[in-house]
Amino acid sequence: MAKEKETKTNAMRILDQNGVVYKVHGYECDGFLEGTQVADLLHQDYKMVYKTLVAVGKSNQYYVFVIPVDCELDLKKAAKAVSEKSVAMLPLKDLTKVTGYIRGGCTAIGMKKQLETVIDSGCEELEMIMVSGGRPGCQIELKVSDYLLVSHAKMDGIIYE
């Protein structure tokens, strides 16, 4: 029996091009799942699994914020992190147009255009992180340092304490 070939996402291709070692975790889903549901399905600690959120600033620039799945983005802290007066969550209808990804598969790696990306500074405590692999049902586990490098992210405190 032939081994089923894994379909690479844009994010995986970029990781491969950069020589980043990563592990793919697949899970069954028929539609959108909350990040905590994904972590539960994969038996992972919520502090290790991060979700990718896209926002738009008062200047109409787009930004990516990456936070643990069990946390909420503090919009005031997020705005300060990107030197904006304010930011608001991107309407879901605009997600694919802006990022090239769909809900449940959005990741800061390999978006249509490189957007300024901020990951919550709590990731400093971790060696490994798990983020969307570029499609629903797919998570990628990789070193935090590799994620920061490939996503061009900076760290800042952007969640409610």
Image (cartoon, rainbow, N blue to C red):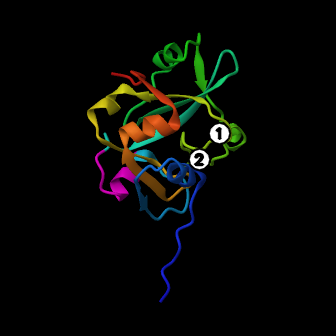
Residue 156 - label:
none
- Quarter-wise, where is residue 54 in the image? top right
Predominant secondary structure in magenta? helix
Q: Which residue is mark 1?
A: 92
| Viewer-side residue, 65 vs 152 | 152
Q: Does the stretch in magenta take in 43?
A: yes
Give the residues in magenta. Answer: 36-45
Task: Say whether residue 39 is left or right of residue 103.
Answer: left
Point 28% across, 37% down: residue: 126
- Quarter-wise, where is residue 113 in the image? top right
Point 67% across, 22% down: residue: 61
The Cα–Cα distance between marks 2 and 1, rounded to whole angstroms, is 8 Å
| Viewer-side residue, 48 vs 160 | 48
Which type of secondary structure does the marked residue at label 1 adopt? helix
**Vertical arrangement, residue 159 with respect to residue 46, above or below:** above
Q: Which residue is mark 2?
A: 103
Graded by Cα atoms within 10 Å as few (under 14), some (14 to 19) or many (20 or more), the crowding at tag 1 reads few
Q: Can the viewer see residue 69? A: no
Q: Does the stretch in magenta take in 3?
A: no
- Quarter-wise, where is residue 92 in the image? top right
- Rendering coords of residue 101 (x, y %): 63, 47
| Tag 2 and tag 1, C-beta contact below 8 Å | yes
- Rendering coords of residue 94 (x, y %): 70, 38
